Amino acid sequence: MSIPVDGLTFSTMTTPAGPNGRASFGRAVLEGMAFSSRANADQALKVSGVKVEKIHLNALGFTHGGAVFSLADYAFAQACNFGDNVAVALQVSINFLRPSVEGDTLTAEATRVSDGKTTGLYQVTVRNQEKTVALFQGLAFKK
């Protein structure tokens, strides 16, 4: 099925079927992403090793926002659960600043902005090899 929008035609996305016979978009987006992370004393955490492949692209040929969000969310989760911390997200948001394309290598760096008794605020910057692709902010509840 094709969807016309302002002179452009988008095809509906199909993804491989999971074990239950249903398509899993999240599984398709994350396929091929290899995460590695390292932290420093300032609670800044860098996640790297995500090479954008064809499966990560949207209908326009850019990296799908869900793939960029997943990388940022992973970095956020690693940062707010660093060490003995146990935390869950209360609220997150992302601003996409520029597209990335197949062949780009994306990195995400999470930095603690505020550390309260029960909440922590983190900012995650997602970059390709040259520029900032997205800014993500996450508020975590700490147990």
Image (cartoon, rainbow, N blue to C red):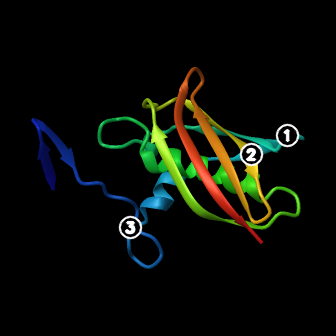
Residue for badge 1: 42
Q: Is residue 49 above or below residue 141?
A: above
Q: Nearer the viewer, residue 129 or 138?
A: 138
Q: Nearer the viewer, residue 22 or 68?
A: 68
Q: Is residue 69 above or below residue 108?
A: below
Q: Is residue 129 above or below residue 63?
A: above
Residue 40: x, y in percent?
A: 86, 39
In this rendering, position of residue 70 left or right of residue 111: left
How many tags in the picture? Answer: 3
Q: Is residue 101 visible?
A: no
Q: Which three-letter amino acid code belongs to the residue tagged 1?
A: Asp
- Give me the residue at 48% from left, 76% from top: 19
Q: Residues at badges 1 and 2 in contact (C-beta under 8 Å)?
A: yes
User: Mark 2 or mark 3: which is in front?
Assistant: 2
Q: Which three-letter amino acid code belongs to the residue tagged 3?
A: Ala
- Give me the residue at 55% from left, 52% from top: 70
Q: Which mark is residue 112?
A: 2
Task: Pick out the residue farthest to the top.
Answer: 130
Mark 1 → mark 3, Cα distance in angstroms: 41 Å
Residue for badge 3: 23
Secondary structure at numbered mark 2: strand
